[in-house]
Image (cartoon, rainbow, N blue to C red):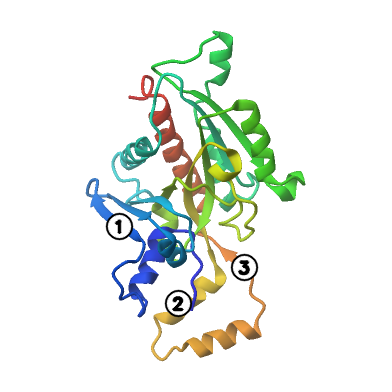
Amino acid sequence: MKYRTDLAVEIHENLKNAEDQSNENLGFTRKQRDIDEDIALTEIIITDETGERAFGKPKGTYITLEVKGIAEEKENIKQRAARALAAALKELISFHYHLKVLVVGLGNEKVTPDSLGPHTVDKVKVTSHLFRIYDCDGDWDMANVSGFNPSVTGVTGMETADVIEKIVGLVEPEVVVIIDALAAKDIRRISSTIQICDTGIAPGAGMGNRRKEISHKTLGCKVISIGVPTVIDSRTLILDAASEMDGWSEKAVTKYFAERDLDMIVTSTDIDQIIKDFSEIIADGINITLHPGIYS
């Protein structure tokens, strides 16, 4: 059975459990390390077409931070998570005097599980106007940062990727940082996981409404995406629950889905707090990365 997930680490878990994964050249590498007692980092690099087929994702780097204790408000956990995120981002974004970045928050601010992007961008320190006011071409303390929340096609009637492409033409950034909601297989990841990748993103992925991709290919500049799983597909949840039961069969679950028109997503009851916590963590991580002289 196929589980729906946007997380590279969960796809890797499925690959590990698959019977046909006995060959040595799988087209990817994986490294894992603990940052501290509460934060672990996993880096998966898809290296060739074999890896692309296995993961269903383009070649590139996928970094996953798994953080324990956010809901329990462990001591300094959000600050530690933000610094871990910043350290990962610095591997993908090199700060320099002329660095210009556009930060884009995908999603619908009025739909809580889809509001991570807009809430995050609202907390990012934008500085582009200061560079214009003081007629500066660069700075060693902070990058030239613009922020943009394009909303969603269902609200604007416009293709989100096309709108972002026009904004990129105006801003001319070196890097575009995209924040969006994702979908997970394991509900525990909704309150513990951040994924960073350098391959771009397809808007609406987490909400089951995948649209035109936003990537280096479409924008002509480096695109870094940061995502947090905020939803689970109802089919995935049922599959996962069924697999834990004695006597379950793939045939029975397939028949169940065939007899019912299920097209729903589910989220956690505390999703409001999850969005608040992760928007703060991601915004702080971005600020540390892009403004080293201010957020040291």
How far across and down, in percent of the image, does residue 31 sit?
A: 27, 54
Q: Quadrant of residue 173?
A: top right
| Residue at mark 1 to residue at mark 2: CA–CA distance | 28 Å
Residue pictured at 62% horizontal, 37% vertical: 149
**Circle 3 residue:** 264
How far across and down, in percent of the image, does residue 163 sit?
A: 69, 39
Q: Amino acid at mark 3?
A: Met
- Chain-order first, disc 3 or disc 1: 1
SS for callout 3: loop
Mark identifier at residue 98: none
Mark identifier at residue 30: 1
Viewer-nearest residue: 164 or 262? 164
Q: Nearer the viewer, mark 3 or mark 1?
A: 1
Q: Amino acid at mark 1?
A: Arg
Tags 3 and 1 touching, CB below 8 Å: no
Q: Nearer the viewer, mark 1 or mark 2?
A: 1
**Circle 2 residue:** 241
Residue 186 visible in rendering: no
